[in-house]
Structure formats: C-alpha cells, structure tokens
Amino acid sequence: MYTRRQQFLQHVAQTSPSPPGLDIESAKGVYLFDHNGKKYLDLISGISVSSLGHGHPEILAAAKNQIDKHMHLMVYGEYVISPQVALAKRLSELLPENLSTTYFTNSGTEAVEGAMKLAKRFTGRTNFVSFKNSYHGSTQGALSLSGNEWLKNAYRPLLNGTTIINFNDESQFDSIDQNTAAVFVEPIQAEAGILIPENDFLKKLSVHCKKVGALLVFDEIQTGMGRTGKLFSFQHFNVVPDILLLGKALGGGMPLGAFISSQEIMQTLSYEPILGHLTTFGGHPVCCATASAALEIIVRDKLAENVIEKEKLFRKLLVHENIRIIRGKGLLLCIQFQSEKFNQDVISKCYDKGLISDWFLFAADCLRIAPPLIISEEEIRESCSIILNSIEEVKSKN
C-alpha cells in the first residue's frame, strides 16, 4: 500500500528532485497541521499568498455566499459579474487615478503575459526591458522577462527583443529606447533576496520611460496587498506605473491575478482585433468574492500599517553572529547567511522544529520571512526562537 507521500511523488508532477512533501491535513490562522497532528508555523504564507492566514472566517463566508449564488457563468468580459465589478471598482478607489481599469486573470504569471500584450498593442512596439534576478513567472513570455539565466537556459530560445539590465543602475537606461514597449520591474525585488531601490531609482526610471515613450510596469505580485507596510509597495517611492500587476495575496487564498491600467490603454485589447486577450476562468466569481473580502479586511484592520512594528520586532530579535544581514521591508524579509548550505541546513532544522521557511530563487543563501500579516507578537517571538536555536545547532556541527 502506497503512502500518500509516495502517491504524491508518483502521480503529481514534480518541480524539484526533493520537495519538503509535508502532508498537511488542515490549516488555521498562522499554523498548518499534518496528518499526525504536528503543527507548523507558516513563516512564508505559501510564498506570500495567505496574507490573512488560513481559514479566515470572513473569507470563508464570502466564498460560501458566492458559491450559493453561482460560480462560472461565461468566458471573461461578456457578462456583468457582480463580484468582478465590485472588486475592480474598489481597487480603482484605492489606486491612483490612472489605474482605473482591471483585467482579472487566474494568476500573476497570466497577468504578466496580458500586460506584455497590452504594452505591445498600445505602443506599437515589440521590445521589453527587465532586470537581473527579477522573477516574473514561468510561462514563455514571463520567463523571457525573468532575469536569471540559470532559470531560463534550458528553455531557450525564448522571446526575442528582451533586454536584461541591472537593478539600481541608472547608467544602463540607454537600453530603454524608442523601440521599447515596456519596462517590467519589481518595485522591491523579491527572489533576488529582497533588494530595495536606492537613490530614487524608480523615479529616475519613470522619467526615462516617459522620455522615450515606454510604458512602466510594476510587478507587485509578491509585494502588493500590504506586505511591505503600504497597500502597494510603489507607494513607498512616490512613483506611479502605467500598468500594475497583482496576484498571490490578491485572491485571499484563491487563485487570482490582475493587470491594471488606464481605460485609454486597456481599451486597446477590445478592437483590431476584438477579443484581443481572452481567459475562460480569469476573474472567477468565487475568487473575486474572496479577494474583495481580503482587501476590505486589510484596509479596515489597518494591517499594512501594523506591518512596520512587526518588522521591527523581527529585526530586534534576530541577532546572531552567523546572520550577515537582514534585508527587506515590512513582512517581506530575508536573512542572509554565509553560504547556501548553511541556509539549507537552518531551514531543515526549522522544519524539524515546526517552522516553515524557504530560500529565494536567486539568493539561495537567504532565508525567507514572509508570514501572514496577522501574525502576533507571541508568534513572532516563537518563530525567532526557533530560527535562532536552529542556527545554533547548525553552527555547532560546522
């Protein structure tokens, strides 16, 4: 008789040779529970998805209420779907005036793909610029934008006309020219190990994009929805994009992405040809209902504002000679160690002690801290204690 883990390895397509393979039975708040009853504190929110923790009663109620009314009715954009309309309207109220029109997708990666098409259609140009060690997704177009050759090389050739330049390096802006349809940038680089823009980098990038007529696209799929201490991380830097990408936490734990722009830009997908961008399930009514509930909780309970104090507590408690540096903003933090192996060993020890963390795609020597925004002071102290004890155990064996 095969165990569930064996069935998982045999029948579910794998993305790595050795996944953690936790067999989770249930989840509540910031904790996951395996089939033996062991609990794990979720310090990564399913990679920045479960920002309100697991099983939030208001999100569950929103899902159940919408299921009782209806689920899928028609392909995207044909019918007036009340949860879509309500979410799009609320987002427009919380965003700058030019970000007034939303196209909903199933995921962040799909939002990237849609934004690429939108930029080409609006500008009549074909080239893109993105940044070293950026991550925008794994589909063909999104992978072409992602800025790490290790991730891309096995799948070449990818899209032509994509240039990768260095983050925080304005000397390379000459690569953004009259042939550039759009520049895709994470306002805070995540998978690079949480890199913050310096010296008004985003403002200077915005000025240059306007100068050459390229659209500026902010990928906030991982940084949005309150995680960095603002509802959207671009609000820290007083720069407004032409297109905003959302995903992950947007759906309140359900699959939902979005690309958002002005009506002037967005309407170009509706003619010559009509149906310029299509999705069957994008903006599913249940996902939009849970997204609206999650958004209102974040705004009502001032969760983004409370994030900064929680960041301070993490930084105060996480002091150890083997921690080289802690980078990040809000509850998107990374601990950098001296090597990838040291980090992996610490992560493994954390799992053993009931704490879930992870590494970064392009910063394997860094440990990820991205807990649900609702994490309490007691839970932060519990997390930090486990991390520090794990560091000590790894240190003693080296």
Image (cartoon, rainbow, N blue to C red):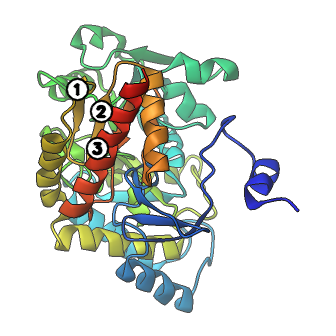
Q: Amino acid at mark 3?
A: Leu
Residue 360 in view (yes/no)? no
Mark 2 surroundings: few (<14), some (14-19) or many (≥20) residues within 10 A: many
Q: Which residue is mark 2?
A: 335
Residue 33: image location, x then y, percent = 51, 67
Farthest residue to the front: give it.
Answer: 396
Residue at figure coordinates x 13%, y 51% from the top left: 308
Q: Amino acid at mark 2?
A: Ile
Of 176 and 87, the residue lying toward us: 87
| Up/down of 171 relative to 152, above or below | above
- Look at the numbered disc 2 and give the secondary structure of its residue: strand
Farthest residue to the right: give it.
Answer: 1
Mark found first going from the N terminus, 1 or 3: 1
Spatial distance from mark 1 to mark 2, Cα to Cα?
6 Å
Spatial distance from mark 2 to mark 3, Cα to Cα?
11 Å
Mark found first going from the N terminus, 1 or 2: 1
User: The C terminus lies in which quarter of the figure?
Assistant: top left
User: The N terminus lies in which quarter of the figure?
Assistant: bottom right
Residue 10's label in the rendered image is none
Farthest residue to the bottom: give it.
Answer: 68
Residue at figure coordinates x 41%, y 65% from the top left: 31
Q: Amino acid at mark 1?
A: Ile
Residue 63: image location, x then y, percent = 48, 81
Mark 3 surroundings: few (<14), some (14-19) or many (≥20) residues within 10 A: many
Residue 332's label in the rendered image is 3
Of 169 and 382, the residue lying toward us: 382
Q: Which residue is mark 1?
A: 325
Quadrant in the rendering for residue 304: bottom left
**Closer mark to the observer between disc 1 and disc 3:** 1
| Up/down of 168 relative to 94, above or below | above
